[in-house]
Amino acid sequence: MVFGREKKGQGTLGSDVLLGRERRALARRGVSVSYNAGFHSKMISFLAEEAERHYFGRTCLVLGPSEGGEQEMRLGKFFGSVLCVDASARVLSTLRKKCPGYSYQTALFEELELGEKFDTIILMHVLEHVRDPVSVLKRIARHLSPKGKLILAVPNALSFHRLLGAEMGLLKTPYSLNASDRKVGHRRVYDKKTAVRDLEKAGLSVLVSKGIFFKPFGNSQMESLEGAQIRGLFLIGEKFPENCAELFFVASIKKK
């Protein structure tokens, strides 16, 4: 999964220019950045574990699939039809080898027009990358079936490791972007309030809201932990949802 990053002044440009820049940035980033490297790959597994509790129906749309396929390889057990969409043809080509039975389409989420609706839409680690998250959510919501579920996750600004970084002077505030954020194209980090705000602005209702994984330190320090310690931190996250590394939501179309 790869994304571009907005530059100052882009908001005054036309949509075609913005999308063109986004597409070129994605192509450059797709060659040089693996979003699944190091400890982050373990986080994807924990998110997948939680997501499976909320799957609905028989059709699934995955927006921004993980290149490693940790979650995607299991989707065939739950759904009769799976479509993966990403802006990077390279990511989809890699995933296709692991999941040959799925359908694939290369597209920017800002241009998403699939002409069908899905029972479950999975949107992991996408909103922090896009230029206009509410606009993207509105477009995605048009692809959700009437009783469908949107399952998504975003990084938590109030994660303990970001609070610690701010206290140590490594971040100006917990909401500031560090070098790792910029490397993978983050434009923002969320807290629960701002994430729910964007979902509701897009006409969605939040059904489930929780934190995933209590992460006390940065990725490099976390990589030294053993399996039992990592599982323990995942379980502790149930007690400290506001300060987990990830914010996890299940949403549906708001009833009129």
Image (tube, helix red, strand yellow):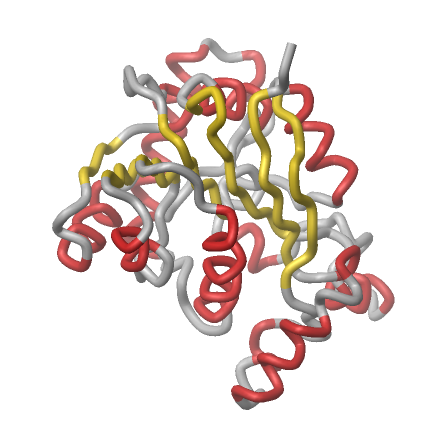
**Viewed as shown, does residue 135 lie left or right of 139?**
right
| Residue pictured at 67% horizontal, 46% vertical | 189
Residue found at the very far right of the displayed protein = 167
Between residues 142 and 191, which one lies in front from this camera angle? 142
Q: 160 or 237: which is nearer to us? A: 237
Q: Against 53, is 127 above or below? A: above
User: How far from the left and from the top, in percent, is residue 171?
Assistant: 76, 59
Q: Residue at x 22, y 53 (%)?
A: 95
Answer left or right for 34 relative to 168. left
Residue 97 horizontal/vertical position (percent):
13, 56
Residue 2 percent across, percent down from the top left? 38, 46
Quadrant that contains the C terminus: top right
Left-right relation of 238 to 110: right
- Quarter where residue 62 is shown: top left
Q: Which image quadrant for residue 59?
A: top left
**Rendered position, 82 above or below 213:** above
Q: In the depicted view, which residue is nearer to us: 114 or 51?
A: 51
